[in-house]
Image: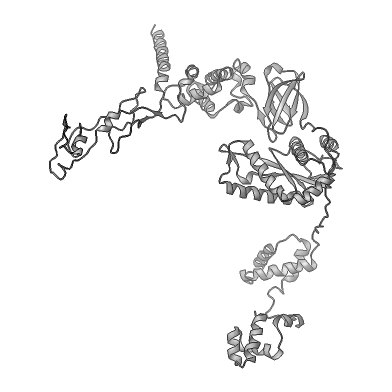
């Protein structure tokens, strides 16, 4: 394509006396093209404006014969893609159309849609006023791959945005519940220090009754809006663009979080509080650049009420015969002493508080989703140990394994003693864990499951009582080395250097100045190359395992250095248990003979 600059240089070259052929070559165009521009003396940009549109084709239209059928299908079903129609044409007319025709066909379909197709949705730009409208929505943060203490943290963020200044606030939450909505909205308003006139949200069920014909607000959400004198707005179902201020801010916010994590160098946090502080600091930095418009908003905001509104939802429920309460299609266990009583469950965003007779009796972690259960073994173990036959087919049996080791122990019991006796053995250790120490039982199971001795409830309980003696999984025992062994260094003196046969030398008990420094340094050593017995292995530990202890090494002696290690073990802790089991087996054998 010839540019205005090329043509201007052509004019200069030709007017300076350069031949047509040389001027065309210097400007990068053919002689025919150069002659045309020299004849009309017009620039390409001017020629395009004055030139009439081309009314002819440079090659035959490959879709002329089939286009009426294509247009008919587009008219009947406008959602058909150009690629789908092109594949249909190739099936209907084998060997007639090729991949090189695809772009031409797509262009023809796009032109038909623009001239004959149906209208497209129109987006209407809105004018926002200071202090008038705030928009909010939940957004999933799982794509950022955040971990808490090495464990994946799946969560959402409640995102609040002022549409005029784009000031934002973020609150972590686990689900799109009303309690999370209430906490997030109130956190934003109290952090802002004022209340806008209107609040817009999407059609989430926590705020809108989507089952009703008029889709009015939920009662609890109306009370929240009334407490802050807010006018509520909702968008239509599956029309996210109507809440575009919040939806657009989601993408920008998550991009900023991802970049901050890359700059931080790690996506792991010690606790949820540390992660929350990280997000709040990031939001503070983002809001710092919105001070001018925010000042206008603050001047137009309504004042806050005297106090916050409680975010909890109170649900009355009765404890059934299984010591369970049912809340929003989820099951929670409470203490069996409450069976048959009416309790009040107070639902917060992250927990459920159980109240009875105006007294707080328990706090449970809130379940996310539907048809889930949280049955704690401490609530039912006293009854279950008296009815061990109910454990095998208990509907919530999987909730009664506090850790993976408890599950492994139950499987080991069932494999060795059968399902009925195995359940009895397991419930004994679960009963001990409930009334004494779950951590001690877990440590005892860690030791016994890796040993070769038979597993029994008595062995677990006996070892759990002495759990303080069980070394931690990461314990490394370091013992003091024998520093006299460091003196046994293999050295070669200047006098015997190069000799074929080297004899051991003994230090002079009364060295004189005539002796070399190297001679005085040799004491009780064997010369390298001497044949002799191999050094003895290190001593055995109390557990009978071989310790790794360096007897000799080359290097400078360091006072106070300690270079001994051995793997921690627990056979000595298990020996009383083995003796007890052996004695039990002997007694059983004697009784059998008698």
Placement of 176 over or under 334, stated as above or below: below
Picture quadrant of residue 587: top left
Left or right of 34 on screen, residue 433: left
Picture quadrant of residue 5: bottom right
Residue 153 on image: x %, y %: 62, 39
Query: Farthest residue in the front direction?
Result: 513
Left or right of 542 on screen, residue 107: right
Placement of 466 over or under 537, stated as above or below: above
Question: Which quadrant does the N terminus fall into?
Answer: bottom right
Left or right of 304 on screen, residue 362: left
- For the question of whether residue 69 can be seen, the reply is no
The colour mode here is one colour
Residue at x-position 65% and y-position 91%: 15
Residue 10 on image: x %, y %: 64, 86
Picture quadrant of residue 594: top left
Judge by depth and name the residue closer to the eye, 177 or 538.
538
Left or right of 267 on screen, residue 317: right
In this rendering, the count of numbered labels is 0
Residue at x-position 62% and y-position 71%: 100
Judge by depth and name the residue closer to the eye, 66 or 293.
293
Placement of 376 over or under 228, stated as above or below: above
Residue at x-position 58% and y-position 86%: 25
Residue at x-position 71% and y-position 88%: 41
- For the question of whether residue 208 can be seen, the reply is yes
Query: Farthest residue in the top direction?
Result: 594
Placement of 492 over or under 570, stated as above or below: below
Residue 534 on image: x %, y %: 22, 33
Residue 98 on image: x %, y %: 62, 70
């Amino acid at each position: 394509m010839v540019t205005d600059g090329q043509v201007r240089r052509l004019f200069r070259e030709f007017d300076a006396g350069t031949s047509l052929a040389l001027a065309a070559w210097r400007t990068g165009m053919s002689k025919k093209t150069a002659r045309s521009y020299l004849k009309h003396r017009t620039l390409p940009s001017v020629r395009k404006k004055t030139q009439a549109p081309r009314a002819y084709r440079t090659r035959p239209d490959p879709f002329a014969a089939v286009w009426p059928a294509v247009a008919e299908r587009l008219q009947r079903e406008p959602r058909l893609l150009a690629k789908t129609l092109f594949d249909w044409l190739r099936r209907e007319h084998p060997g007639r159309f090729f991949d090189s025709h695809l772009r031409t066909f797509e262009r023809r379909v796009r032109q038909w849609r623009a001239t004959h197709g149906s209208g497209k949705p129109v987006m209407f730009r809105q004018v926002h006023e200071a202090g008038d409208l705030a928009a909010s929505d939940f957004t999933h943060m799982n794509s950022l791959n955040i971990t808490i203490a090495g464990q994946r943290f799946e969560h959402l963020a409640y995102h609040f945005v002022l549409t005029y200044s784009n000031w934002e606030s973020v609150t972590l939450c686990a689900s799109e519940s009303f309690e999370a909505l209430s906490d997030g909205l109130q956190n934003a308003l109290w952090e802002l220090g004022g209340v806008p006139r209107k609040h817009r949200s999407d059609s989430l069920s926590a705020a809108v009754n989507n089952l009703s014909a008029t889709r009015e607000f939920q009662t609890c959400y109306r009370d929240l809006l009334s407490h802050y004198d807010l006018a509520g707005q909702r968008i239509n179902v599956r029309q996210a663009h109507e809440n575009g201020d919040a939806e657009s801010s989601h993408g920008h916010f998550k991009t900023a979080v991802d970049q901050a994590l890359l700059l931080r160098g790690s996506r792991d946090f010690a606790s949820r509080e540390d992660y929350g502080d990280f997000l709040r600091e990031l939001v503070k930095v983002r809001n710092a650049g919105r001070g001018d418009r925010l000042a206008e908003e603050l001047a137009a905001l309504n004042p806050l009420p005297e106090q916050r509104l409680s975010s909890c939802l109170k649900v009355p429920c009765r404890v059934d015969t299984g010591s369970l309460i049912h809340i929003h299609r989820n099951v929670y266990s409470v203490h069996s002493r409450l069976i048959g009583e009416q309790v009040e469950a107070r639902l917060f965003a992250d927990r459920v508080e159980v109240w009875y007779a105006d007294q707080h009796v328990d706090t449970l972690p809130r379940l996310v989703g539907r048809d889930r259960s949280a049955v704690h073994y401490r609530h039912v173990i006293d009854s279950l140990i008296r009815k061990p036959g109910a454990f095998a087919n208990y509907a919530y049996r999987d909730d009664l394994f506090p850790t993976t080791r408890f599950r492994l122990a139950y499987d080991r019991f069932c494999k060795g003693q059968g399902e009925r006796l195995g359940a009895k053995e397991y419930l004994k250790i679960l009963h001990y864990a409930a009334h004494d120490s779950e951590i001690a039982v877990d440590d005892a199971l860690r030791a016994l499951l890796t040993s070769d001795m038979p597993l029994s409830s008595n062995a677990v309980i006996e070892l759990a009582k002495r759990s303080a003696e069980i070394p931690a999984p990461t314990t490394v025992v370091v013992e003091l080395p024998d520093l006299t062994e460091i003196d046994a260094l293999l050295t070669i003196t200047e006098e015997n250097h190069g000799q074929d046969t080297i004899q051991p030398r003994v230090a002079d008990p009364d060295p004189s100045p005539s002796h070399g420094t190297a001679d005085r340094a040799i004491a009780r050593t064997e010369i390298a190359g001497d044949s002799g017995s191999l050094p003895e292995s290190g001593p055995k530990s109390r557990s009978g395992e071989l310790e790794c202890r360096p007897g000799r090494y080359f290097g400078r002696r360091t006072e106070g250095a300690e270079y001994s290690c051995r793997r921690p073990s627990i056979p000595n802790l298990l020996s009383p248990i083995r003796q007890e089991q052996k004695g039990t087996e002997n007694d059983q054998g004697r009784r059998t003979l008698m």
